[in-house]
Image (cartoon, grey):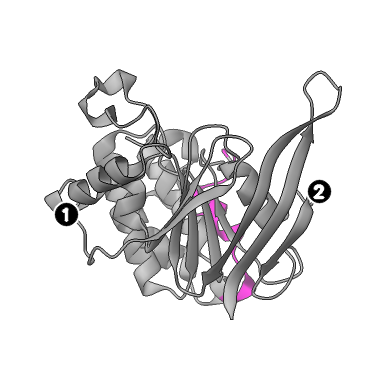
C-alpha cells in the first residue's frame, strides 16, 4: 500500500480583494510508496506549503482526494510535521516540548529523552527554547516530528534561513533518523541541491498555479556528498536538459550569493 495518494484537481483561495478567487494548485497527482524520501521542489508561491496543508488536513477545502495509508487526512494515522519555523512553546522546557506531542507509547518507551540525547541535546532537556540557538531549536522540532514514529513525516522547508554548516548537520541528522525509522518523508524545498542530496525522488512543480511538471527518481548512491562531483553533475544535467523548467535560473551557481534565486 502507498503511504500517500494525492489527486488535487484544484485548490483555490479567495482573492485578496474579496473579488473572485486565486488558483493555487491544479492537476497535482502522485503516489508515494512506503519508506520513500520524496522532495517537492518549486519556486516561491507555487503551492508547496498549500500541498502540505492539504495533506495534513490543516486545510480540507479543495477539489480532489488525498489519502494517507488508505484513509483521508485526519482520519488515518497521525502525521509528523515540521514547519519552516520551530514553533516551540517558549514556556515549556525542551523535553516538555517533545513530550507534549508524544503518544502514550512513545512516552512509555522513553522516546523523547532518547531522541534528544541522540541529537546531543541531553544537557538541555530542562532548558527553555529562548535560551537555545536557532540550530538547536530546529533539532528539538526534528525530535518532535519523529517522536511518534509516524508513517508519514511532512517537513516544510525546515532548514531555511540557517547557516549552511548548521543546515548541513541537520540534513545529515534527518537522514540518519529516517534510515533508522519506518517513516516516509515528504520534504518541501526550493533548493535543488538540498533535494538532490536528500531524496529518493523529486517532484518539480511549476509556478502558480502549481502542478507537477517533472517526476524524477534520484539514483545517486547513499551516503551522498552534498558538494561532490556526482551531485553537481546531476544538478548541471538537470539545468541543461530542462531549461524551460528552470528558466532564468541556470546561472544561479555562478551568481553572487545574495542574488542566487531558488533552484540554485
Residues 172 and 47: in front is 47
Range shown magenta: 90-105
Q: Residue at x 37, y 59 (%)?
A: 199
Task: Identify which residue is drawn at 54% across, 50% down.
Answer: 212
Query: Tag 2: Cα neighbours inside 10 Å, few (<14), some, or many (≥20)?
Result: few
| Mark 1 surroundings within 10 Å by alpha-carbon count, few (fewer than 14), some (14 through 19), many (20 or more) | few
Are discs 1 and 2 less than 8 Å apart at CB? Answer: no
| Chain-order first, disc 1 or disc 2 | 2
Residue position for label 2:
61
Q: Is residue 244 above or below residue 216?
A: above
| Residue 56 visible from this viewpoint | no
Question: At numbered mark 2, what does the secondary structure look like: helix, strand or loop?
Answer: loop
| Residue plotted at (63% across, 73% down) | 104
Name the spot of residue 149 as percent of width and height, x first: 52, 71
Q: Quadrant of the C terminus?
A: top left
Q: CA distance from mark 1 to mark 2?
A: 42 Å
Q: Is residue 67 something that shows in the picture?
A: yes
Q: Which residue is mark 1?
A: 230
Q: Check if residue 156 falls in the magenta segment.
A: no
Q: Nearer the viewer, residue 133 or 153?
A: 153
Amino acid at each position: 500500500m502507498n503511504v500517500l495518494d494525492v489527486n488535487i484537481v484544484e485548490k483555490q483561495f479567495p482573492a485578496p480583494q474579496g473579488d473572485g478567487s486565486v488558483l493555487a494548485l491544479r492537476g497535482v497527482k502522485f503516489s508515494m510508496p512506503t519508506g520513500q524520501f520524496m522532495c517537492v521542489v518549486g519556486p516561491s508561491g507555487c503551492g508547496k506549503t498549500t500541498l502540505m496543508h492539504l495533506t495534513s488536513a490543516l486545510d480540507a477545502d479543495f477539489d480532489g482526494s488525498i489519502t494517507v495509508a488508505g484513509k483521508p487526512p485526519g482520519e488515518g494515522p497521525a502525521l509528523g510535521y515540521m514547519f519552516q519555523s520551530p514553533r516551540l512553546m517558549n514556556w515549556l522546557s525542551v523535553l516538555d516540548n517533545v513530550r507534549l506531542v508524544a503518544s502514550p507509547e512513545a512516552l512509555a518507551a522513553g522516546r523523547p529523552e532518547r531522541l534528544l540525547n541522540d541529537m546531543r541535546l541531553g544537557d538541555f532537556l530542562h532548558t527553555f527554547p529562548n535560551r537555545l540557538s536557532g540550530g538547536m531549536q530546529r533539532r528539538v522540532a526534528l525530535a518532535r516530528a519523529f517522536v511518534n514514529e509516524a508513517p508519514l513525516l511532512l517537513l516544510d522547508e525546515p532548514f531555511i534561513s540557517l547557516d549552511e554548516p548548521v543546515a548541513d548537520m541537520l540534513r545529515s541528522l534527518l537522514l540518519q533518523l529516517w534510515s533508522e525509522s519506518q517513516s516516509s518523508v515528504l520534504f518541501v524545498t526550493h533548493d535543488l541541491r538540498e533535494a538532490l542530496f536528500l531524496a529518493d525522488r523529486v517532484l518539480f512543480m511549476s509556478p502558480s498555479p502549481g502542478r507537477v511538471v517533472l517526476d524524477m527518481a534520484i539514483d545517486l548512491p547513499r551516503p551522498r556528498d552534498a558538494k561532490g562531483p556526482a551531485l553537481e553533475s546531476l544538478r548541471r544535467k538537470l539545468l541543461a536538459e530542462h531549461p524551460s523548467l528552470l528558466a532564468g535560473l541556470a546561472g544561479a551557481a555562478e551568481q553572487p550569493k545574495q542574488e542566487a534565486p531558488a533552484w540554485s
